[in-house]
Amino acid sequence: MEQIVIALSPFTRRSRSLGVSHVEQGLIRGLEPGEHVVVHDPVADEHYSAVVADVEFDLADTSYRLEIGGRITAAEADEWLEPSTGSGHLTTGEIVALLAELRRSERDISTALAELQAR
């Protein structure tokens, strides 16, 4: 799981949406739609869960729109950011990713069922 370090404005906190630049963040890899990330506001020293909502590409950079979720503690953020141990035990980040995938699957199934019923 990736961490985005950026100061959050009062507007961003209210709107729960944030635009970030791949280049400005110095990300090692690209983020995928639906991927969960941790957002850290170093000014307020607060951590938030977030999900990549949109991705936009251009020649010089990639921009991401993140939907900011709930506030999490620094200890929770550290747990989310722990790399997989390969020991067969799931990390908090892996559990969060599995739950997100389950939610997406549930929405896909609900949409498919609604389309079938509309026919």
Image: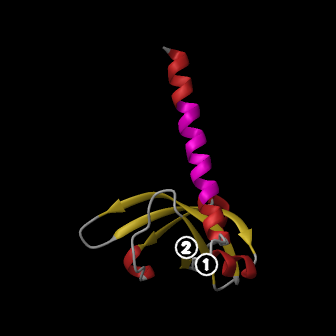
Q: Which residue is labeled 2 in the image?
A: 1
Q: Which residues are magenta?
A: 98-111
Q: Position of residue 117 (x, y in %)?
A: 55, 17
Q: Position of residue 74 (x, y in %)?
A: 73, 81
Query: Which of the two residues, 93 or 42, is positioned nearer the viewer here?
Result: 93
Q: Main secondary structure of the magenta part?
A: helix
Question: Residue farthest to the front?
Answer: 87
Query: Which of the two residues, 43 or 96, is positioned nearer the viewer here?
Result: 96
Is residue 111 shown left or right of residue 68? left
Q: Are marks 2 and 1 in contact (CB under 8 Å)?
A: yes
Q: Amino acid at mark 2?
A: Met
Gap in angstroms between the C-alphas marked 2 and 1: 5 Å
Position of 60 relative to 104 (above/below): below
Local crowd size for mark 2, using a 10 Å CA cut-off: few (<14), some (14–19), many (≥20):
some
Question: Residue farthest to the top?
Answer: 119
Q: Amino acid at mark 1?
A: Leu
Q: Which residue is labeled 1 in the image?
A: 81
Residue drawn at x 39%, y 70% is 30
Q: State the image quarter where residue 96 is shown.
A: bottom right
Q: Is residue 106 magenta?
A: yes
Q: State the image quarter where residue 55 is shown.
A: bottom left
Is residue 10 shown left or right of residue 111? right
Residue drawn at x 57%, y 52% is 101
Where disc 2 sits, the SS reads loop
Query: Which of the two residues, 101 or 49, is positioned nearer the viewer here?
Result: 101
Q: Position of residue 73 (x, y in %)?
A: 76, 77
Query: Which of the two residues, 39 or 88, is positioned nearer the viewer here?
Result: 88
Residue drawn at x 62%, y 77% is 87
Where disc 1 sits, the SS reads helix
Q: Is residue 97 magenta?
A: no
Residue drawn at x 51%, y 56% is 34
Question: Residue farthest to the left?
Answer: 59
